[in-house]
Image (cartoon, helix red, strand yellow):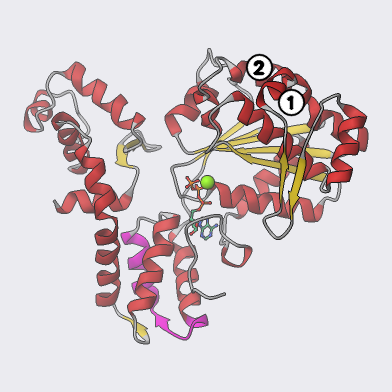
Amino acid sequence: MKHPFEFGGVISAAHFINRKSELDLLEKNFISGQNTILISPRRWGKSSLVNRAAVIVAERHKSFRIIKLDLLAIRTEGEFLEAYLSATLKALGRTIEKSLKLLREVASILVPKLTFSAGPDAQMKVGVDWKQAVQNKSEILELPQRLAEKYKLQVVVAIDEFQGIAELVDVNNFDAVLRTIWQHHQNVCYCLYGSKRHMMLALFTSYSAPFYHFGDTHVLEKISREHWVGYIVDRFERFNKQISNEVASWLASAAEDHSHYVQQVAQIAYGLSNVDCTQETAETAFNQLIYQLEPFFSEQVSSLSRTQLGFLAAVLNGEVAFSSSRVLKKYNLGTSANASKLKVVMQEKEIIQLTRSGEFEFVDPLFKAWYSRR
Ligand SMILES: Nc1ncnc2c1ncn2[C@@H]1O[C@H](COP(=O)(O)OP(=O)(O)OP(=O)(O)O)[C@@H](O)[C@H]1O
Ligand SMILES: [Mg+2]
């Protein structure tokens, strides 16, 4: 452990804090074969949570296999199917010989090339050409169920950034194809998670969508302040420096308990501290973080129209009645129809989101802090 804090990817077990109720829920759903849908804004810790749950379940229940894939870089149906086949074989076959044997036993897919790279990030790569993968679509999608049945296993298919399924460039209604096949699976359950809230909600909660009522749907909460405070104080101590509960709490609150930002700002504060992290050091750390992020935020703002910027200012000032003539005039939002459109567009851009209590808030707390200083 070289750094006191960790950010920029799936968190390691040693740094993973809390999420106890979420881990219990996932374990329970995996064991009972319940499909789960998980939504949260970026960098709150979805991937870390599902990964941790997968490790725990695999350790405790020997008949479990978790097939994991991420749709972030996947653009076409063929790429999806190739990744699906690779992930399935990696989780269930584990070695090339065993994978080829499995394929011969339960499917008639011809795989000309299988490569396996060793090491902690072991990759199983399947060399099927995409046309061929598309021709064998249903065989590939049925594979987890067939293998689970034959080998008496319970299988979880966990797909990260699942909203990408609606954006494959060369195929329409692929979600309907998946739903049709998946809903018959008795020994496989699906854990589908993603960060684009409006797209995820459209896939799973709109009445006409194929995935309507597909599973147990949850919007992830933030990790609470008390857990962050305990964690920050402990990490400073382990690395021979100190921070008080109050200053640690100030850091977490400045980052609005946003998982990635709390870790990042705490890392900067640790670096700036001689031995003791004072309130002043914490504030300098927060300013440094905003300074680091400034180029990204400037770019984001430069792509927004005047009315969109007006809308952001209104959200920042805590306005709620966006269609009232006072707000329309004060922030130059145009007509009330325009204000309604702005709400939709700004959510689609993932800049603002609705809270549980029905108000708008900035998705990115550092963007909010930066914008409010302008
Ligand atoms: N349980 C946790 N304990 C401590 N830190 C966490 C935890 N979960 C997430 N984090 C912090 O948040 C960062 C982002 O986590 P993760 O990548 O899992 O989020 P995500 O929601 O999948 O993000 P993305 O939208 O980028 O895919 C991690 O790198 C880590 O710094
Ligand atoms: Mg993720």
Check if mark 1's residue and mark 2's residue have beta carbons within 8 Å: yes
Q: Is residue 246 above or below residue 25?
A: below
Q: Which residues are magenta?
A: 237-254
Residue matched to label 1: 141
Q: Which of the two residues, 92 or 56, is positioned nearer the viewer here?
A: 92
Q: Earlier in the sequence, mark 1 or mark 2?
A: 1
Is label 1 in a helix, a strand or a loop?
Answer: helix
Quadrant of the rendered structure where residue 125 is? top right
Q: Is residue 320 left or right of residue 138?
A: left
Residue matched to label 2: 177
Q: Is residue 239 part of the magenta span, yes or no?
A: yes
Q: How many other residues sit within 10 Å of disc 1, few (<14), some (14-19) or many (≥20)? A: some
Residue 303 picture location, percent across and down: 23, 35
Residue 329 picture location, percent across and down: 7, 27
Q: Which of the two residues, 196 or 340, is positioned nearer the viewer here?
A: 196
Is label 2 in a helix, a strand or a loop?
Answer: helix
